[in-house]
Image (cartoon, grey):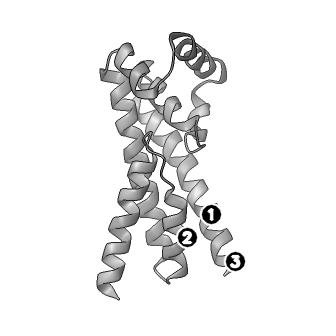
């Protein structure tokens, strides 16, 4: 069981990290299966949150350091879509980062935060808070349904 737990925790970390990038992965499925296997809910939520936030930090770094052309190509968005994404971020403000976990909009949101040079402390606090709450809610739902 210890070996399974170690692999499970590592697998969840990798899945959560990659799910925060543009790769079409779902860390929620991995989290749910590991919760049902009896691993520590506290540890699983902490590991999933950490991996997912680090993945978002990777997006932030891309936005911060890459050229707009590279970002548009990576996100597969046009000039107009890029401008609209920036405008939405400015319109809804810093607290929109609480929703960085939302599929489709979350990844570009974290990249745009880097492009706009949002203070890293605020970025980490808001992104981590939103992702932590999401994983806690998912964990509670899975454990109550089991």
Q: CA distance from mark 3 to mark 2?
A: 12 Å
* Above/below status of 31 relative to 49: below
Category of crowding for the residue at label 1, using alpha-carbon neighbours closer than 10 angstroms: few (below 14), some (14–19), many (at least 20): some
Label whose residue precedes the other's in the sequence (3 or 2): 2
* Above/below status of 56 relative to 117: below
- Please tell me which residue lies in front, 47 or 79: 79
Q: Residue at x 60, y 68 (%)?
A: 139
Badge 1 element:
helix
Q: Residue at x 57, y 16 (%)?
A: 81
Kindly identify which residue carries mark 1. 138
Determine contact: label 2, label 1, CB under 8 Å: yes
Task: Tell me residue 131's x, y (percent).
Answer: 54, 50
Label whose residue precedes the other's in the sequence (3 or 1): 1
Query: Which callout, 3 or 2, points to the residue nearer the camera?
Result: 2
Badge 3 element:
helix
Quarter of the image that includes the N terminus: bottom left
Kindly identify which residue carries mark 3. 144
């Amino acid at each position: 069981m210890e070996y399974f737990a170690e692999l499970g925790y590592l697998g969840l970390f990798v899945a959560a990290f990659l799910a925060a990038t543009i790769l079409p992965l779902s860390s929620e499925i991995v989290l749910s299966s590991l919760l049902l296997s009896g691993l520590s809910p506290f540890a699983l939520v902490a590991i999933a949150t950490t991996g997912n936030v680090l993945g978002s930090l990777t997006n932030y770094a891309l936005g911060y350091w890459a050229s707009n052309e590279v970002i548009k190509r990576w996100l597969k968005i046009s000039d107009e879509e890029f401008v609209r994404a920036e405008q939405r971020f400015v319109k809804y403000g810093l607290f929109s980062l609480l929703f960085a976990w939302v599929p489709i909009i979350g990844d570009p949101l974290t990249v745009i935060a880097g492009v706009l040079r949002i203070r890293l402390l605020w970025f980490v606090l808001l992104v981590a808070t939103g992702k932590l709450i999401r994983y806690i809610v998912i964990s509670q739902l899975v454990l109550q349904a089991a």
